[in-house]
Image (tube, rainbow, N blue to C red):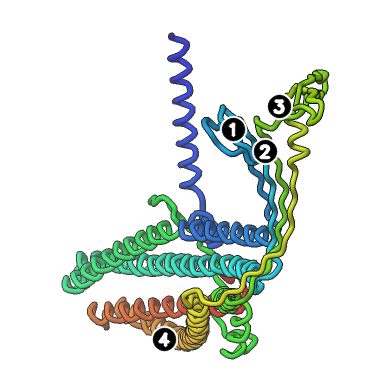
Amino acid sequence: MQAYHFKFRLTACLLIAFLGISAICQAQKIWTLEDCINYALENNLDINKQLFTVESSKEALLQSGLNMLPNLNANGTNVWNFGQTIDQYTNTFATNTVRSNNFYIASNVTLFSGLQKLNTFKENKINLMASNYDVDVLKNSISLSVAGFYLQILFNLELLDVAKEQLQITTAQSERIEKMVNAGASARGDLLNILAQKATEQLNVVDYENQLYISNISLQQMINLPVTRDFKVEKPLLKAVQPPKDKITVDVIFEHAMKTRPEIRSAQLRVESAQKRLAIARGYVQPVLSLSGSWGTGYSGVARQVDPNVPPKFLIDSVGFTKTSHEAVMVGQASYSYRTKSFTDQLRDNSNQSVGFYLNIPIFNGWTGRSAISQAKIQKSQLELDLGIKTNDLRKAIEQAYADATSALQKYSASEEKVKAQTEAFKYAQQKFDVGVMTSFDYNQNKKDLTTAQSDLLQAKYNFIFKTTILEFYMGNPIKIDRE
């Protein structure tokens, strides 16, 4: 018993240690954008749900292919009959208990039914391709969302760095002013203003830390990862923002997207599927020609035959008298012994085969065929409209992303110039403040203007990166971050 408890404790300790090591490794992992996207694609429930739809489409395609082959069915019976009945093989009355068997094999193949089975196979094949594209639609949507959350984290990281940098500057100034106030070289009002600014910037740091934490949570929830405070993303050295070398127009992007975007390909395939559905519906009003064949045999317990193993008995009996001499007329009759006909002989003797063509011509069936055709036409029109809507939405999305990227680039250029100007203005203000020719209020205002300019520059930078990422994605390029 003690050995058992020792093994149990040892196993529990090893399990706890393993879980602890796993948690530490998970906490120490630095997540790249590619890591986040891959994890999201593997663990997203909507994608996994759509994959079951793909599997269902595969089964439907397989079944529709097998439906074009001839069917083959067999059956057998073993029946005991009690009481009077007519035996189906001897066509005689049976009054005692009779055992009978029937064996039957039949096959049927449809030679023509308005090509319904062939069109059903083609429809299911198209539906399978559309289902695969639907999976890609989900993957694209999730990948873009992950990229957006990831860039939001990078944006918040840089905002936090700016806030901490400004706090360091203010902290150094407050220490310097405090020394000057103690020495009587500066007014206490200047120190109070600087301390108020320091408190404001400390609050900004806390706010940006909370924004960073919230964006971390949002990304973890997006990729379906258990939320932890230790989650960290890679902070790559981003490539400098600059206009694209090759001027790509909206029309070029749209033309390429129409050929490659999964939502467009899926909608196009749904229209093709509707065309096959219409062809299937038209088959309902077409004649159906089929070929059938069968083989059957059976056994009956009342089927009897002369027993060859028992010799017959000859009996002489009087059947009458002659007319003139009145002599008896004697006739010899053979008396045979009978036995039940063997199972094998009956199966052979009762064997029967059939083959035949069957033609079914629909004349009137409650207008079901015509109604199916009308419904198929309506569905086809709806799917064509859906394709048009998705095409328009794609065009609008590309135009909007293109306009946003252009605007973000212009805003970045203007913000960059503003940051340069505000940086020089702040340096000049700091020099004036240091020598006592600028009030602390004016100094703080210059500092706020610089911080605002830096925030605007960061916002324009990440907005441009995200919008250009969308445009690259529409061009069929993978989602990635351009690095130095």
**Image spot of residue 99 (x, y percent):** 61, 30
Pick the quarter of the image with the C terminus.
Answer: bottom right
Q: Quadrant of residue 338?
A: top right
Mark 3, Cα crowd under 10 Å, few <14 / some 14-19 / many 20+, is: some
**Residue 362 versus residue 304: which sits nearer the camera?**
304
Name the mark on residue 90.
2
Q: What residue is disc 3 on?
A: 340
* Residue at disc 1, secondary structure: strand
Answer left or right for 350 relative to 207: right
Label 1 and label 4: CA atoms lie apart by: 112 Å
Tell me, yes or no, if residue 201 can be seen here: yes
Compared to residue 157, the image places residue 225 above or below, namely: above
* Label 2 or label 3, whichever comes before in sequence order: 2
Pick the quarter of the image with the N terminus.
Answer: top left
Label 2 and label 3: CA atoms lie apart by: 12 Å
Badge nearest the viewer, 2 or 4: 2
* Label 2 or label 4, whichever comes before in sequence order: 2
Label 1 and label 3: CA atoms lie apart by: 13 Å
Answer left or right for 13 relative to 214: right
Which amino acid, mark 4? Lys
Label 3 and label 4: CA atoms lie apart by: 113 Å
Name the mark on residue 94.
1
Label 1 and label 2: CA atoms lie apart by: 10 Å
**Image spot of residue 447 (x, y percent):** 32, 77
Which amino acid, mark 3? Thr
Answer left or right for 384 relative to 440: right
Q: Which residue is found at the position 49% from the left and 81% from the top? A: 374
* Residue at disc 4, secondary structure: helix
Report the residue that reaches farthest toward the top. 1
* Label 1 or label 4, whichever comes before in sequence order: 1
